[in-house]
Image (cartoon, rainbow, N blue to C red):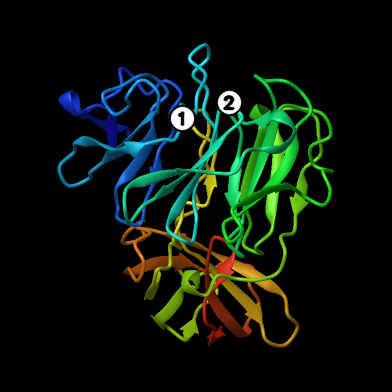
Amino acid sequence: NAIYTGPNTWFETLGMSVMQSSNDESGFTLLTNNKVLTVDAKNSPCGNGVNGGAELYDQGTGLWSCTGQTPIHLYNPADEELGSAVLMYNNKVFQSGGNVVATAIYDVASGTWTAGPTPPGGLDQADGPGALEPNGKVLVDYSPGLFANGCQFLEYNPTGNSLTPTVNNLGCPAGSSFLGHLMILPTGQIMFTDFGTSPVSVYTPAPGVVAAAVPTILAASTFLKIGSANNVLYGKQLNGLSQNNAYGDDYQGETNYPLVRLTNTSNGNVYYAFTHDDSTHSIKPGTIMFTHFDLPATIPAGKYSLQSVANGIGSNSIIVSVK
């Protein structure tokens, strides 16, 4: 394993690699305790030969350690594929099985695993995307068998521990789950794209926002200049409480960073500022942090309602003047 330490620079962790022989098909999931979870896709000291192993990376020590055992091997030894692992707003991770019709739930607080619901219709996720909805559910893209066609969007509901097909399946007409990608949008909708020729699709989740996940603006300048750079916004949990979008070993599109949205109070037109140089990307609840933001040169003068947006969830609003 290696750590990115700056432009074009990596630091090899040397003897601090994962405990499984390699992390060929395993993904990384940042947790609210600032540790990183990975599910083993090979036999390792963390498993017992029947149940699969899982590991935690400690950013402070640079070491990996075992963290419970999955209810079964969530991978097929013949291909070692795994599915997405999405940290939810209940502080648990929804882990999809690879070429195995199964799911599992990891409790971050206790470090233990329990069995999740069995996917319907023999569906699995031998590579595929998952994304957290503002209402707390998880949208996933599954298909039958290893890289087979016939993908289906499902929703995991942590309240009822259920995994059910979405109302429609328009974004996934025929392909396999490994082709798909999901990305939360600032609106709270989820965008789907694939490697093929399917059109871009947008999924609108059921209404609702998990109250504990709402970011809070604590301080920001209320007088902003058109095209100005390095304005500062202070707030609480501006990164949200999850990286939100997951896939696994082949693709990750995390969104644990703040966006700045400005809505004109006169006509409702919406603009986004470019955010950068955030003080942290931690998703620990209650984290106090700041971000810098640059206003576009094309934003008209006027009064705006300014919000910080994390994973499709908007903060409280402050009124600002742009000149």
Query: Which one is earlier in the sequence, the residue at label 2 or at label 1?
Result: 1
Q: Which residue is mark 2?
A: 100
**Amino acid of disc 1:** Ile
Query: Percent from the top left, x then y, of residue 12?
Result: 22, 27
Where 266 falls versus 308 (above or below)? Answer: below
Give the percent coordinates (x, y) of residue 46: 29, 29
In the shown orientation, is residue 199 left or right of residue 38? right
Name the amino acid type tagged 2: Val
CA distance separating discs 2 and 1 = 10 Å
Which residue: 69% across, 58% down? 189
Residue 153 lies, in percent from the top left, at 73, 42
Q: Is residue 196 left or right of residue 281?
A: right
Residue lying farthest top?
A: 78
Q: Is residue 88 above or below residue 40?
A: below
Q: What residue lies at 60% left-to-right and 71% top-to-bottom?
A: 209
Mark 1 highlights which residue?
72
Query: Which image quadrant for residue 29?
Result: top left
**Can residue 173 be seen?**
yes
105 sits to left or right of 46: right
